[in-house]
Amino acid sequence: MSGPVDYQRFVDAADHQIVNHPRRVVGAFLVLTLVFGAGLGAVSTDAGTEGFTQDVPAQVAFEEVQDEFETSAFTTDTGSTQLIQRGENVLSKRGLLRMLKAQNRVEDHDELRVTSTASAATIVATTLDPQARTTEQQLRAVERATPREIDQAVRTAADRNPRFVGLLSNDFNHGSASAGATIGVITHEVPAGLSASAGQGGSSPLTPLQLRTDYVVGSVGGEMIVFGSGIISAEFANVIGDSLIIVVPAAVLFILLFLIISYRDLADLLLGMVALAMGLIWTFGFMGLAGIPFNQILITIPPLLLAVGIDFGIHAVNRYREERVAGADIGPAMRITTDQLLVAFFIVTGTTVIGFSANLTSALPPIRDFGIVAAVGIVFTFLIFGVFLPAAKVLLDRSRQKYPIPTFSTTPLGAEGSRLGRALSGGVFIAKRAPAVFLVVALLATGGMAYHATGVDTTFSNEDFLPPEENPDYLMALPEPFKPSEYTVTALTNFLQENFESSQSDTVTVYVEGPMRQDQSLEVLYRAGDDPPDAFVRQGGRADATSIITVIDEYAARDEEFRKLVERNDRNGNGVPDDDLPAVYAALTAEDSPVRGQALRYITGDRRSTRLVYSVKADATQSEITEDARSVAADMERPRTSFRATATGSTVVFEAISGLILDSALTSLIIALGGTAVFLLLVYWVLEGKPSLGVANLVPIVVTVSFVAGSMRVFGISFNAFTATILAITIGLGIDYSVHVTHRFADEYRQRDLYEALDRTVRGTGGALAGSMLTTVFGIGVLVLSVFPAIGQFGILTGLSVIYAFVASLLVLPSALVVWARLFGGGGTTAGSGDTPPSSAAAGDAD
């Protein structure tokens, strides 16, 4: 039987080059490897969450806020570094002096670009001596004071200055004037636009400053820890390197072990490893040449490509050995092999590319990059294992006839009569007896798992990209250079949240655009804080907010003339001016105003926009905070106000990304399934004249996807930046197994009856699938060794998807094929009398 389109001439052309000109083919591929290898040095790293925030509407609003208020009054930004002091009574004379010495030393280093320092020690020193304005003067004030005077100054500062207590840990004792930890703040001058993203990036202007600060502060002694966004960014980047240096060698070791079992021949093993290495070089070289940065999600690319490459390699060698054992010479055996497998590899590649490319629909750039790199890598893998490996194998076996190259085994996996072959035939046994009943049961189970999967959560946070607080002992026991770094960010973040009230809340920003000169404008902002929603922190029954009203209140409290201006224009006596606002703004932003810079951080010079920063509860979820922030923003947009208000900030941005992650997962799943279905229908119409065979081919994929999604809820794994791609990947990897079975079945069914064709298919292809499955599961399973917990979850899910795909292809697919044969007929010995199997084609044996 032949399909409506003559595809065989393309396969024959490839066969001719592989069998008759293997040296030419191998040489061409080696040259291409050198070309792509040149791109490896151009691969850059883009770590952290910043890449995910690009183009998100909430992030666009966040950037507008930063542009309007953070840099409007200055040509540079400021960035802060925290000094965390702990391990002693930080309010003792010794503790205060240690913090002040650290501040003084960083101020003396011009390269740190320090504009100011502040701490609880600073407040105590100025309480002792109000004239001590510099850090050196504050040091002398503390040095001259007695312990009793210091204790009294601590109590006075705690009573008079609320900010003082906020810099101390929760164990602060007023009576004994003691605390176990404190935070100092160093402010650096950095290039404008530092805070333009809600996410953390892999590089930051603060990173070198904070790393140098850590070195300077280390000379002070005691437990003084430097912490900040630059340190976080540095750890984002380090985690990628540490994960790769653990995961890739471990994957290679497992792959090597199972390839030894699968090939059982040293020369074939080395050939397979060379092909795998070429696939990685081509893919990462392409990334460098295309300018695609390496991010955390792309850590999954090497195991995925190795998984597909291993499968292709084992199938190619196994199928070739089947023909050699049957008595075929090198050339004819390889021609028969490539006749069948080039088509199967093409189908697998097409469906896998569709599965991976479905991620291009994502609104998140790193996921789109993943889709591009994975799809291109799979095409490279098809070319290398479909053309280069067979040509190199022909060259190798012909060289064995001339030179004493040792041969250890030429027996295919799962050969007829072998234990493995018999063990893999369980699905055939079921298909012979009750295929329809079993298929209905399998589909019902699939529906149940799909329904269970509707409860899977979606998350996105910086924590997904950070290592655990403590690396597992088995990782720390690794020798150098595999031993991961000792990370501090997660532990310090947890320490701050547990020990400081000030770190127990986050903030959201409401960006307001409108005529701020109108008399009622500030009243609208003020009333928005009445009866705040549950996620907002309350202070005196109102929302705890910082805004231009806060600047007005603080300036009025210390400047008599400005206070009178506010009172004259406050018609309802609530402290908020609601008349002649241009005069109020002019007084705030005058060139000689001491609060000019602060005011311009909350209202623009053209008086067309402002911002309010609300404190929110630490135990509130992202969705609760976002919903409440949007509610407050909507309240400011009441018909009479003519304001446009937008809720933004990192929490709102991350919640928006969480929604995009779910949308990405579902959209890519729908596109991948739909695209794969159409592709399979078309391919089987072209190849076999039976498009309905594509439907049978799709059954195990639907089963696999449903079980993977259901397993996510069973194991408590959420859709996140890494697992968002898992459903499309499941289709991309899982289709590999079902295509090999279906395509081999179609070939066998041309000459044999239904059950004999099915039995030969499972025994012949099943052995290669088993070897591929074990190698892939362990090769991808090493992702659990990553210092990224989220990458470990991805490894678990990908391993499960491969196991489910293998089981479904050998257990469910045989029944689906029997039901298909009964419904659509065709094939078998009665339908194939005039057909000639591909294995009968003549083959040359010349180089």
Image: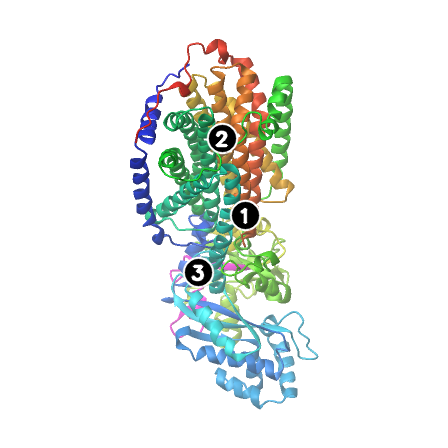
The image quarter containing residue 429 is top right
State the SS at label 3. loop
Image quadrant in which the N terminus is located: top left
Q: Kindly report which numbered mark, 1 or 2, lies closer to the viewer in this rendering.
A: 1
Spatial CA span between label 2 and label 3? 40 Å
Determine contact: label 1, label 3, CB under 8 Å: no
State the SS at label 1. helix
Q: How is the image coloured?
A: rainbow
Image quadrant in which the C terminus is located: top left
**Magenta part of the protein: which range?**
588-615
Picture coordinates of residue 167 (x, y %)? 58, 72
Q: Which residue is mark 1?
A: 782
- Magenta region includes residue 375: no
- Magenta region includes residue 607: yes
What is the number of the mark on residue 195? 3
Q: Which residue is mark 2?
A: 673
Q: Nearest the camera: 406 or 179?
A: 406
| Amino acid tagged 2 | Leu
Q: Kindly report which numbered mark, 2 or 3, lies closer to the viewer in this rendering.
A: 2
Query: Closer to the N terminus: mark 1 or mark 2?
Result: 2
